[in-house]
Amino acid sequence: MAAPPRKSNGGLVGRLVLMTAGSFAFGFALVPLYDVFCDVTGIGTRAQLSRAAAPDTSAPDMSRVVTVEFTASVPDSGPWEFAPAVASMEVHPGRLYEARYTAHNLAGRDTTGQAVPSITPLRAAQYFRKTECFCFTPQHFERDEQRDLLVRFIVDRDLPPGIDRLTLSYAFYDVTRLAGGKG
Amino acid sequence: MRPDEVTNMAHGNAAAGHGDHHRPPKGVMRWLTTTNHKDIGTMYLVFSLAMFLIGGVMALLIRAELFQPGLQLVDPGFYNQLTTVHALVMVFGAVMPATVGLANWMIPLQIGAADMALPRMNLFSFWLLFFAFVLLISTFFVPGGAPAAGWTLYPPLVLQTGNAFPMAIFAIHLMGASSIMGAINVIVTIVNMRAPGMTLLKMPLFSWSWLITAYLLIAVMPVFAGGVTMLLTDYYFHTSFFNAAGGGDPVLFQHVFWFFGHPEVYIMILPAFGIVSEIIPTFSRKPIFGYEAMVYAIASIAFLSFIVWAHHMFTVGMPLAGQLFFTLSTMLIAVPTGVKVFNWTTTMWRGSLSFEPPMLFALAFLFLFTIGGFSGLMLAIVPADFQYHDTYFVVAHFHYVLVPGAVFGIMAAVYYWLPKWTGHMYDMNIAKWHFWLTAIFVNVLFFPQHFLGLAGMQRRIPDYPTQFTDWNMVSSIGGFGFGLSQLLFVWLIIRCVKGGQRATAGVWDWPHGLEWTVPSPAPYHTFEKSPELH
């Protein structure tokens, strides 16, 4: 055969397989990168919402009133009752407030629940600070147990002027099967 | 040097004569054991045609259900299975394998190589694909039915899939592995096996488009494989990549998916760009205008495809800076795409045009793909997208770029190279009937969907308010017209394989490129001795 001397395919194939493996790894690297990106840019994420903050409460802005609305949902968790004690509050930025939710386990067994918070509008999320929240840890409920859940929060004084209304929403998930891992 | 200089650069002995000393085994064993690029290309093309018809039957069931409001034929759950599997079959089973089949057949012939670089892997990737689709389509028969969460497989909805869930995920893994192997094969073939003297910038544009497509495949298919693997571990091993209860985020899946998904749409369309860039010069009897600009345009489109993904998910919410970035980067793609459209048009300028079937399909591609491109620009505008999102406007948009875009490109390629494959000319009358019926019905089918979408009709719903009835009826009539017209295509291909007027080596009036220097049908072995280019 008079074919021209073929260049080695092995090396090139090796490099291409390496590229493939790199892309596969990159797919998984997107998971932490996604959180890092949200943290850096301050887009409303759970990472931020699920952390205790210690903001300055010394000088509340008494001239400004912001409405905070509370909602609750129970996706996929079966027969739970979970609702805010009040539908909304009027708050002054920079001052500490307290709100309560009530949860009632009607599942007929011991259950561990995890509340996941979110704030609308999204760009307000980074100005909503919690000093204490039942959403920081999984909550264990005995069968038929009912109890109040507490959240203490401050709306930051730097909240952009265009925003006069925030909605704090909690989705309450049954994490009994995940609880082992999550503690 | 320009590709037109390639026209006469190869000479007679390139292929004929001593090509036939390894006869393939007879019967079914030939197809199970072959490592010949032409056999494997044929298998890919036949497989893709079969998938096109199967996916088409699903589409017709969808259009039959939507012919009038109310639920007539299928229940909503099955309807959702149909839309989901129709999309997966058409994307991964019809369009992608068709372009892989064309690559297998034509890249060695275009660059003067004896075969693909990795022939055994080539065969393996075909059979992986085959079994991937056996697995996927068999999900219709398991408890819970086929996946029904849409081809985008968004969690948490997709996690409600029944027994089909792991089957669908593994089918995606298999088809991903198959296309990655195909891509590696194309790159190694093009990089290592070009005939002496064929520098990269003398390479025909179809081969160029595939080289870039192959790199896209290697870059993004593994990301998709990673994403569906995360779905799998969320489902079975209680990880929480996308599970909010455990600290994950379902929106993350959308980012991972579309990081794959947007380059994926270019994986489907770039080979069609390459095909049209071959056909328009041939039937304009002029070399392509701006060859190098065409190459750079494909490369720019490929690069930009990595930084636009979030335009598919404006409605999940993102900061203004993000909306602006993804709007503008998306619109930027119109620049290299415009370069291509203008260069095709300029190639025809003062050309000596003739309208054989490949040219007809290429011209229809040019017009109709551009319509799909423009509606894409509309969707890139955030405030407009908030209205159009998940409506039939989006359905109309991506069907315009995929059906009269990618599929017309593939049909043009079949009409262009079929005489080279079979050695026979096909029946021009049937081909023209097929073209005109297809080109008219595809517009009857998809154009009204723009109106439906703008009026607010949602996608993925088997029923709709009665004010949408008229355009849905028109669209369904177009759908059945389009579907039945494809039977002409199948009939024409079968007849052309069986016989017909002998095709010459050049086939067309102004052939250019190495593939037209080998006899028709192309012998089983070609370019065992490298052609000389001058």
Image (cartoon, rainbow, N blue to C red):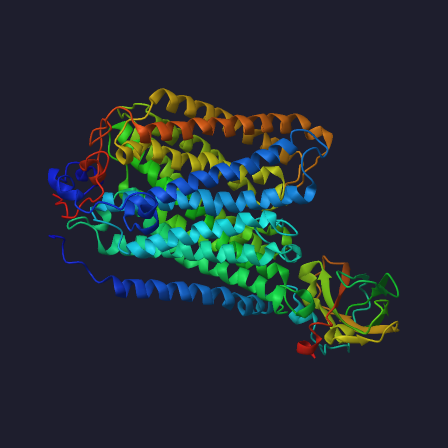
From the viewer's perspective, is residue B73 above or below residue B129? above
Q: Is B469 positioned to the left or the right of A150 in the image?
A: left
The x, y position of residue B147, in whole percent, is 60, 50
Residue B430 visible at all: yes
From the viewer's perspective, is residue B382 above or below residue B413? below
Residue at 14% x, 40% y is: B10
The foreground one among B384 and B421 is B421
Rendering quarter of residue A157:
bottom right
Residue at 35% x, 45% y is: B28
Q: Quadrant of the C terminus of chain B?
A: top left
Residue at 55% x, 42% y is: B86
The foreground one among B7 and B321 is B7
Q: Is A93 positioned to the left or the right of B233 in the image?
A: right
Rendering quarter of residue A18:
bottom left
The x, y position of residue B397, in whole percent, is 53, 38
Residue B296 visible at all: no
From the viewer's perspective, is residue B347 above or below residue A25? above
Rendering quarter of residue A126:
bottom right
The x, y position of residue B504, in whole percent, is 20, 29
The x, y position of residue A8, in whole percent, is 22, 63
The foreground one among B74 and A156 is B74
Q: Is B353 positioned to the left or the right of A38 in the image?
A: left
Q: Quadrant of the N terminus of chain B?
A: top left
